[in-house]
């Protein structure tokens, strides 16, 4: 009886050792299999992540944004001068301690101001051009001209839409590539009512009083939406593009913001330093091509 029990005990022990060895072997095989599978998985995920980063960095090359000089090129000359290539006008200084709103000045007074007040030594002969001057100078040499209309005293929007349309339709200043936009929705609507031939846009920004963003979709006849660039993100782009509206980012003057606007695929970038933006776009294009990014023929 004792012999039988002892034999069973030894048999059970051997069976237990075999079971334990078999279990350890299975665990070892599973670990080796996992070690064999994990590196390719991590490599695949890393490649996908790098591809997404690469795509975000380079995808805009398929449809580069329009580069719009805000008041001309501030790296060349003061904004809104004929040398700087600008067209807009806001406040002009008469003396060290006096300013006046442009709406209170005659065209001759504006012409007399010139740009020498900005930099007397360098720009003695530079003048502030009228809209007619600017259109005659640039309309046939650029893809688009933005007429950024400023509404103010003493007449505000009264008759302004008709005045704008009369200028852009003159024989010597006809501007088929003009875009008219304004922070005043009333003026933009007036232009839309009076003419269906000119491209118009409205402005999206933060309300000065509340800090809230103005409504994205508020004007059916406008083809362009000028958006204050910190407000632009993927969702905003998706909403506006779904409604067939082009997104123009303004006013983008630092490299980091310029880069972000390229990543967001805006349709145009309004900047006071177009030379810097064009250099960034060219450098990014070169880098993308060197990294193997292919452009369609």
Image (cartoon, rainbow, N blue to C red):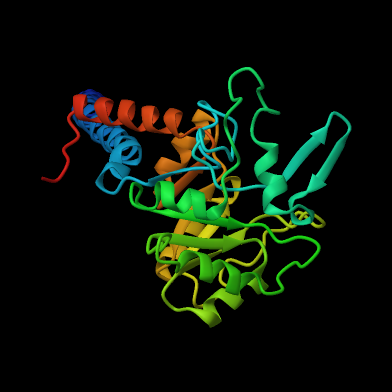
Please say whether residue 188 is visible from this viewpoint.
Answer: no
Q: Quadrant of residue 24?
A: top left
Left or right for 76, reference 15: right
Residue 147 vs 160, above or below: the answer is above
Q: Residue at x 77, y 68 (%)?
A: 155
Residue 211 vs 64, above or below: the answer is below
Q: Residue at x 72, y 46 (%)?
A: 109
Q: Residue furthest right?
A: 97
Residue 50 locus on image (x, y percent): 30, 33
Q: Quadrant of residue 282?
A: top left
Residue 263 locus on image (x, y percent): 41, 42
Q: Residue at x 65, y 36 (%)?
A: 114
Q: Nearer the viewer, residue 234 or 91?
A: 91
The C terminus - image quarter = top left
Left or right for 1, reference 214: left
Q: Residue furthest left?
A: 297
Please say whether residue 178 is visible from this viewpoint.
Answer: yes
Residue 229 locus on image (x, y percent): 56, 46
Left or right for 134, reference 80: left
């Amino acid at each position: 009886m004792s012999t039988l029990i002892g034999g069973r005990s030894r048999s059970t022990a051997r069976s237990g050792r075999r079971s334990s060895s078999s279990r350890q072997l299975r665990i070892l095989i599973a670990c080796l299999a996992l070690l064999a599978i994990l590196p390719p998985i991590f490599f695949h995920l890393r490649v996908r992540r790098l591809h997404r980063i690469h795509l975000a960095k380079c995808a805009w090359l398929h449809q580069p944004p329009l580069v719009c000089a805000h008041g001309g090129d501030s790296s060349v000359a003061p904004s809104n001068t004929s040398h700087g290539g600008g067209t807009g006008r806001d406040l002009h200084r008469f003396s060290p301690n006096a300013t006046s709103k442009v709406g209170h000045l005659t065209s001759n007074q504006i012409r007399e101001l010139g740009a020498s007040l900005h930099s007397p030594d360098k720009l003695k002969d530079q003048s502030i051009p009228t809209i007619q001057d600017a259109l005659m100078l640039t309309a046939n040499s650029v893809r688009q001209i933005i007429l950024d209309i400023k509404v103010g005293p003493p007449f505000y929007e009264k008759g302004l839409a008709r005045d704008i349309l009369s200028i852009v339709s003159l024989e010597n200043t006809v501007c088929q590539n003009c875009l008219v936009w304004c922070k005043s929705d009333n003026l933009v609507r007036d232009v839309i009512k009076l003419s269906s031939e000119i491209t118009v846009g409205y402005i999206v920004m933060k309300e000065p009083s509340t800090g809230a963003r103005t409504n994205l979709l508020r004007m059916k006849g406008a083809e362009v939406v000028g958006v204050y660039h910190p407000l632009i993100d993927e969702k905003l782009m998706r909403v506006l593009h779904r409604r067939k509206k082009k997104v123009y980012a303004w006013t983008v003057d630092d490299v980091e913001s310029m880069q972000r606007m390229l990543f967001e695929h805006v349709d145009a970038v309004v900047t006071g330093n177009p030379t810097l933006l064009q250099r960034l776009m060219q450098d990014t294009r070169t880098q993308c091509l060197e990294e193997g990014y292919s452009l369609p023929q």
